[in-house]
Structures are given as C-alpha cells and as structure tokens.
Image (cartoon, rainbow, N blue to C red):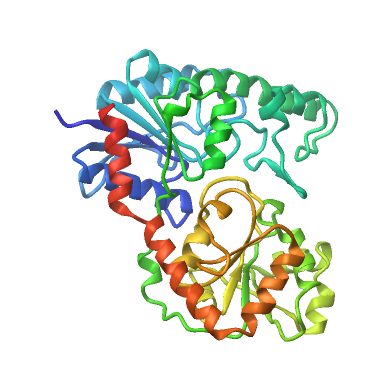
Amino acid sequence: MRRKILIIPDSYFGNYSGAFVAQIAKQLLKEIGCTVAIYSDEITENQTEADGVEIYYRNKCSSTANWFVSKYKANYAKVLDDFKPNAIFTLGSVTNKNIIFWSMARKRGIKIISKIFMQDFFCNNYYANDEKGLCTKCLDHGFKECLFRNCVRLNDKGLIGLFKKLNYTINRYRLQKELIRTDAVITSSKQQIEFYVRYGIPREHCYKTPLYFNGDRLKKYNSTMGDYFVFVAQNRIDKGIHLLKDVLEHCNLNVKVVAAYASQKSIDYALQHFGLQSYVEKGILEIRNECTWNTNLGEVVAASRGVINLSIWPSTTEFVLLEVLGLKKPVFTYKVGIHPEIIKSGYNGFVADTSAAMATQINELANNDSLYRDVSKGAYELYLQMTDWEGWKNTLKEILEK
C-alpha cells in the first residue's frame, strides 16, 4: 500500500526558502513512492496541482489559535478524514502551527515527522540568541526564564507585554508535551540534536540531514575569482549585522567588502545603527542597493573572492551558506551551529572564534590566489555532500519504515 503523507509547511508558494524546502520534500516523497498532499494557509479553498497533488486549505493561526481551537480542529479533522494520511510532515517553525496538528494526529495513530528550522520550540523567539550569541536560558531552566527574568529578545513592556509573554510561555509548555512524543525530528546539525535531547526528545528519534535545497538557479552563473568579498546583508542580529564593523576594523586597507542590500531603507538603517559609515568613507566597504536573487545578487557573489557569513544563529544549514558553496566560493563563518561541524578552515571554507580572527583569514585570502583555488574546490565538494538527493530520500525511507 502506498504511504500517504500530509505536509504542513510554513509556506509552499513563492520564492521563500520555506517554500523551496516544502516543494523539495514533496518531490522526495513522491520519488520514494508516497502519495503527498499539502496543508497550506496560503490559499482560500482546496486546490489540485497539475501533478495531482491535493492542496488543502488551512486556517491561519492567530495568537489565540491554541485557546479557541474549534474552527482549527474542524478544518484539520476534515482534511485528515478526506486524505487519510499515514504520516504528517511539519516543516519549519512550530509556533505558527496549531498544537492540535500534533495531538490529533497522535491520537489517530498517524506517524509524526517534524523538520524544524527555528529555535522557537524552546525559545520564545524564532532565533535563540542575542548580540553575544546563543541563548539557552529557557531550554536549560524552563520557559519561566522568559516570563520572569527578562528575555534577551522580547522588549514588550507593561500589561500587554506580560500577556504576550504569558501566552508564549503557556503554549510552549503545551507544545513541548506533544513535540517530545514526535516519531521523528529532522535537523542538519549535531548541535541542534543536542537541543532536542535536552528538550526531552529521545535521541533515537533525531535524524541529521542537510536542509533541502535545489541549486538549479545557481547553474546559470559563471564563478570567477574576484577581488572583493560579499556580505549578504540583513539587519538582523541573528545574521550578525552588528558584527560587521568588528570584522572590518581588522581588515587591511586593500580588502574590499560589498554589503549587498535589498533596499535603500535597509541601507539607511544600517548606516545609522551599526557603525558602518566610517568604513564606507575609508573605501573598505561598498554598499549596494537592490541586490536580490531576482536582480543581480547571483552575479555579485559569483564574481567575488568569497562571502562573509556573520550568522550567529545556532541552528540549521542556511540557504546563504548553500548558495555560496554551490557557487564554489570560500565562506567565512563564526564557530557556531553547523559551521564547525562541516567546515575545515583553509580546505573548504573558514571558521573563526572572533571577528579579529575572521579578518585575518580574509586578509590572507585577499592576497593568496592559490589558497582561493584550493578552498573553492573544497567548497563545491562540500556543497555536493550537503545536497545529496539520494541521501535525503534514504533518511525519509528509514523514518517511514520504522
């Protein structure tokens, strides 16, 4: 009998990273002989795709969705009754999905698989870090840390702020009771598995496999050795924007860094808040506007000497990392999350403990063509290892056959 899998993603349509992951998950499951359906909150009524895949309408989860559940429960029950899945497969964040997605499936004897991209399962934010790096207060001591001990990321004050934190806290306690009973949890780093184990998920239920990624759009670019480095810029502390000035402070004057921004508004904010203006004036930093994958970001990266990835997000493989490796570019990272698990400095990329150490690596690569060629080769070899389609399918088969 063909297995029937209901995918519950963050997104399925458009050019979002979560949508790409969901589309790849669908294809992987189809290739191993499963019948697949999608449960999406991006549509207003049920649809059928050209390949026959059913897309079921899902109610968007509001902040009160886990308290007033009747409409969510009725909608979900109707989908489960109609499609009759053997397993559900949640993708991405867990807090934008109703707790009943796990509990109702479990009570019906439906296998539950969750591929979690964020830290919101143990943290009241999507990204469990502050400007200094990883925060595991709530993982180590319970969610009361957020409620009573000044969460490093939640700034809401007064009665409204208290109610928000109380809502977050109670719902995470309730969600934890379901997640620890999940049949399989998939991530892409050893560090994340350790988070799951400390959270209460049995180690034997944890699977490590790289983030689903389709590099087809990279094939049109011709990668060459350039004379500048790229920072794919976002004004978020989990992406390390506040650390860029610390790296630039230690770079030689012959180093050129291009900060690729999507909008002028973001550029203005960065110049005002992250201490970058002086480096623009010195000529070390150039800030470019309207750089996205839909415009010219691919060309900018492909013609560079390397990419500076300042992420201090203690989690999974990022799309930026995979895109850079797929374009055969040396990548500079901090020693956090998956980076030290897969990158060997000077062989397939660079890992640093500090901003000064990262700058030293950048200075070296800026003047060493031979090193660039060696690391470029290693970077692409790593990319091929991390985008192993057959490996992804084998992991899913192992989970489903248990």
Q: Is residue 394 left or right of residue 260?
A: left
Residue 220 location, quadrant:
bottom left
Front-lying residue, 291 or 378: 378
Can you tell which quarter of the image residue 167 is in? top right
Is 140 in front, or is 26? Answer: 140
In the picture, the quarter occupied by the C terminus is: top left
- Is residue 95 something that shows in the picture? no
Q: Nearer the viewer, residue 251 or 158?
A: 251
Residue pictured at 32% horizontal, 32% vertical: 399
Residue at image point 54% right, 28% down: 197
Residue shown at 42% from the left, 68% from the top:
380
Q: Is residue 267 left or right of residue 376?
A: right
Image location (x, y in percent) of residue 359: 72, 71
Above or below: residue 178 compared with residue 184 = above
Q: Quadrant of the N terminus?
A: top left
Q: In the image as oriented, which residue stretches furthest toward the left?
A: 1
Image location (x, y in percent) of residue 212: 40, 50
